[in-house]
Image: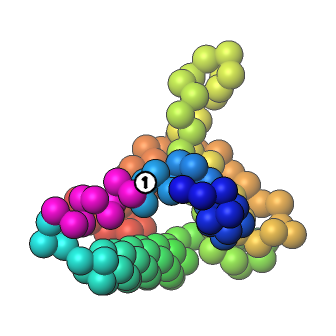
Amino acid sequence: MREERAQKIREKLTVFGQGKLQDLITLYDFLQGSDITLEDVRDYLEYTKEFLRQLNLKQIKIHKERQEKWNRNTRRCPQCMMPLGLRPITTPKGKANREGYTCHWYCTEETCDFEEYMKEDFRKIYKKIMGGR
Ligand SMILES: [Zn+2]
């Protein structure tokens, strides 16, 4: 390759770096020897992006529905009437958990400081609120 041509190409492709350019050649050679076109790859990428986007939307919807169900069925804060959240406590009874608490009710209202510690089984309370086995 002549230096003049190399300089011209360098100006346009240097931004991609050596690694990406090598990948381009590898992919190009692969596509040449297959029945997959560049358009197929483009469509496949779009398809995959859309699939992941839909999956993400589904997960957001499921999470939102669970949250709404929780908020409908959970205890209300005795101080401000907002729905209470429930956290499991995994620290076993001992020095760090003298009373042997298993879960912690807390108010979901940021400005409210209500909290209550329990010794009931977290999963039982959760099932009572959310249903299921
Ligand atoms: Zn509250």
Which stretch did the figure color magenta? 25-33
Image quarter hosting the N terminus: bottom right
Instruction: Give the residue furthest to the left.
Output: 35
Q: Nearer the viewer, residue 20 or 84?
A: 20
Spot occupied by residue 43 in the image (x, y as percentages of width and height): 31, 83
Magenta stretch: dominant SS?
Answer: helix
Residue furthest to the right in view is 111
Q: Would you identify the image quadrant in which residue 31 lies?
A: bottom left
Please count the marks in the image. 1
Query: Which residue does the image show at 69% across and 77% down from the upper left?
Result: 82
Q: From the viewer's perspective, is residue 21 above or below residue 19?
A: below
Q: Which residue is mark 1?
A: 23
Q: Please, what secondary structure does the residue beneath circle 1 have?
A: helix
Quadrant hosting residue 112: bottom right
Q: Nearer the viewer, residue 125 or 88?
A: 88
List x then y, in percent, for residue 108: 70, 69
Q: Residue at x 16, y 62 (%)?
A: 33
User: On the picture, is 93 further left or further right than 113?
Assistant: left
In the image, is residue 125 above or below residue 98?
Answer: below
Q: Is residue 14 left or right of residue 47?
A: right
| 31 and 43: which is toward the camera | 31
Residue at 36 percent across and 75 percent down: it is 45
Query: Which amino acid type is marked by label 1?
Result: Asp
Q: Is residue 30 magenta?
A: yes
